[in-house]
Image: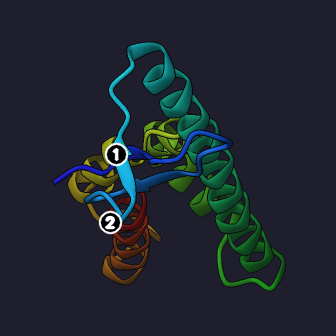
Amino acid sequence: MARKFYKENIEKHPAIAFELSAPEGFVEITDTDTLQQLHNEKYLERESDGHDYFSNFRTKIYIKILDGTYTEQEVFDLETLFSDLESKLINGNWMTAKAIVYNLPLQGIFDQEMKDDIYNYVTDYVDRNY
């Protein structure tokens, strides 16, 4: 079940909620223009979250080059493997990113542990935000 936008059922400055069901005292927002604006704001948040996640991931990988855990070539190969995943995350398309990471083949330094860590993080994000 997807989350929906709800507004507080009062006249002056109603609060907005994005929930699986209407909180007490809230009604579903059905106005198309309002929904478009609210969903656009959500995607801007998701873009920011995706950018932050990928930037932190990239930083951790870079540190592993510096400490000798990974070679530059191994990381280059990982970046190539992740090009579509990176694009989806930084554009806020977390549901698509979830499908992409699920289907990525294990290759090079992209082992089962790394795949599980990324997949679990993305899945948790989708569960909390969609």
Which color scheme does this rendered protein use? Answer: rainbow
Mark 2, secondary structure of its residue: helix
Q: Element type at marker 1?
A: strand
> Residue 85, position in %: x, y?
45, 45
Q: Residue at x 69, y 61 (%)?
A: 58
Q: Is residue 77 above or below residue 58?
A: above
Q: Is residue 59 left or right of residue 7?
A: right
Q: Tell me the kind of residue under disc 1.
A: Val
In the rendered image, which quarter contains the N terminus? Answer: bottom left
> In percent of the image, x 40 and y 46: which residue is there?
6
Q: In the current view of this chain or complex, which residue is farthest to the front? A: 11
Q: Residues within 10 Å of mark 2 (few under 14, many from 20)?
A: few
Position above or below: 112 against 30: below
Q: Position of residue 9 (x, y in %)?
A: 45, 48
Residue linked to disc 1: 27
Question: Which label sits in the foreground, 1 or 2?
Answer: 1
Q: Position of residue 130 (x, y in %)?
A: 35, 52
Q: Are marks 1 and 2 in contact (CB under 8 Å)?
A: no
In the figure, residue 84 lies in which quadrant?
Answer: top left
Quadrant of the rendered image containing residue 98? bottom left
Residue 127 disc label? 2
Looking at the image, residue 85 sits to the left or right of residue 71; the answer is: left
What's the distance in space between the residues labelled 1 and 2, CA to CA? 22 Å
The part of the image, by quadrant, that contains residue 19 is bottom left
Mark identifier at residue 55 = none
- Rendered residue at 30%/47% (across/down): 100
Task: Judge whether 101 appears above or below 35 on screen.
Answer: below
Going from the N terminus, do you reach mark 1 or mark 2 first?
1
For the residue pair 92 and 70, the one nearer the viewer reads as 92
Q: Amino acid at mark 2?
A: Asp
Q: Residue furthest top?
A: 33
The residue lying toward the viewer, choosing from 92 and 129, is 129
